[in-house]
């Protein structure tokens, strides 16, 4: 894998232009470029009349050693550095269980790293409920905490369920200290999940009702889209218009707009799709309530 740095293209360049620029920079034919990924994209707006995009690309090419040797004078083309994280150690058999105090972002991350190193960590959390400890929190902050709590509980519960299933089936590979990771990494189809069910969970009460669905990448994106839609003000009319444009976007590019996109317009279309889904869910809930009433 080769890393190409400082690859500059105009701001409004067509999508195929990026591949052509990579081929030209490497001096290889299209058949010899196996694949490529965008590692980083930045903007050069020093000249407002000619704004440029500056790419850092990781390219997989055939006969990589010979290509690298031929381009040895180009300091912007180097082997892609190995950025994979490797745990500094692995737990020995019979190692004591480490205790992590606090279930905030740092505590959860510490527990994850310990689990990846083969330990079986215990994470403790205690204290007053959030609204009593921080009475001045805004509604937006309380909503952010609520969503975080629901997601964390769901992941944990599904991991425990996966461990239980593995133990009952005798699957030794999914048992032991990696069971949490094995459970979280189990993916399922979530098209039948009503994301508005998340609003039925109140993290400030003593009892919880955890969604009986696994958290996969699609679901996490769906949760994020719903949260983002609540942060922006989009009328139902505008949401419908954005959803129509998103459908056209999908027909042209073969995918829906991404709410994490660096492109502001693509992100706005994704927010519109999420907002329209929310409006529809609210309408269904209101209709069901009227029918039951």
Image (cartoon, helix red, strand yellow):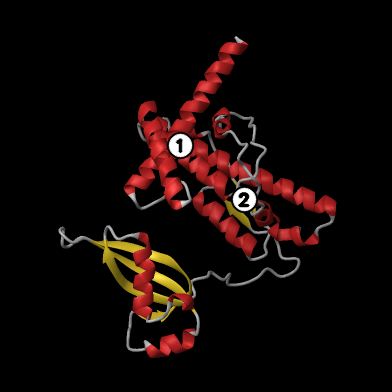
User: Mark 1: which secondary structure?
Assistant: helix
Quadrant of the image occupied by residue 120: bottom right
Q: Residue at x 65, y 40 (%)?
A: 213
Q: Secondary structure at mark 2?
A: strand
User: Residue 101, image x and y in percent?
Assistant: 57, 51
Q: Nearer the viewer, residue 240 or 149?
A: 240
- Residue pointed to by mark 1: 274
Work out whether residue 14 or residue 150 is closer to the camera in this orientation and state it.
14
Residue shown at the point (64%, 30%) measured from the top left: 207
Residue that lies at the very extreme toward the top in this rendered image: 293
Mark 1 Cα shell of 10 Å, populated few (<14), some (14-19), many (≥20) = many
Q: Nearer the viewer, residue 157 or 72?
A: 72
Q: Which residue is mark 2?
A: 123
Viewport quadrant of the C terminus: top right
Which x, y percent locates residue 242? 38, 36
First in sequence: mark 1 or mark 2? 2
Image quarter of residue 291: top right
């Amino acid at each position: 894998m080769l890393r190409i740095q400082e690859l500059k293209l105009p701001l409004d360049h067509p999508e195929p232009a990026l591949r052509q620029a990579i081929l030209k920079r490497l001096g290889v034919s299209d058949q010899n470029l196996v694949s490529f990924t965008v590692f980083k994209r930045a903007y050069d707006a020093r000249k407002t009349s000619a704004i440029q995009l500056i790419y850092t690309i990781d390219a997989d090419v055939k006969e990589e050693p010979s290509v690298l040797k031929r381009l040895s004078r180009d300091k912007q083309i180097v082997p892609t550095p190995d950025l994979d994280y490797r745990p500094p150690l692995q737990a020995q058999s019979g190692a004591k269980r480490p205790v992590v105090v606090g279930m905030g972002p740092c505590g959860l991350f510490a527990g994850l790293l310990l689990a990846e190193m083969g330990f079986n960590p215990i994470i403790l959390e205690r204290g007053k409920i959030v609204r009593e400890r921080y009475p001045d929190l805004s509604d937006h902050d309380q909503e952010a905490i609520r969503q975080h709590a629901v997601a964390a509980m769901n992941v944990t519960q599904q991991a425990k369920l996966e461990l239980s299933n593995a133990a009952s089936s005798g699957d030794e590979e999914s048992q032991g200290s990696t069971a949490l990771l094995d459970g979280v990494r189990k993916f399922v189809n979530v098209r039948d999940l009503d994301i508005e069910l998340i609003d039925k969970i109140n993290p400030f009460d003593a009892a919880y009702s955890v969604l009986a669905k696994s958290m996969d990448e699609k679901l996490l994106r769906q949760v994020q889209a719903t949260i983002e839609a609540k942060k922006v003000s989009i009328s139902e009319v505008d949401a419908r218009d954005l959803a129509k444009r998103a459908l056209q976007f999908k027909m042209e590019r073969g995918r829906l707009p991404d709410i994490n996109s660096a492109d502001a317009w693509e992100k706005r279309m994704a927010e519109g799709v999420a907002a329209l889904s929310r409006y529809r869910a609210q309408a269904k809930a209101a209709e069901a309530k009227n029918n039951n009433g």
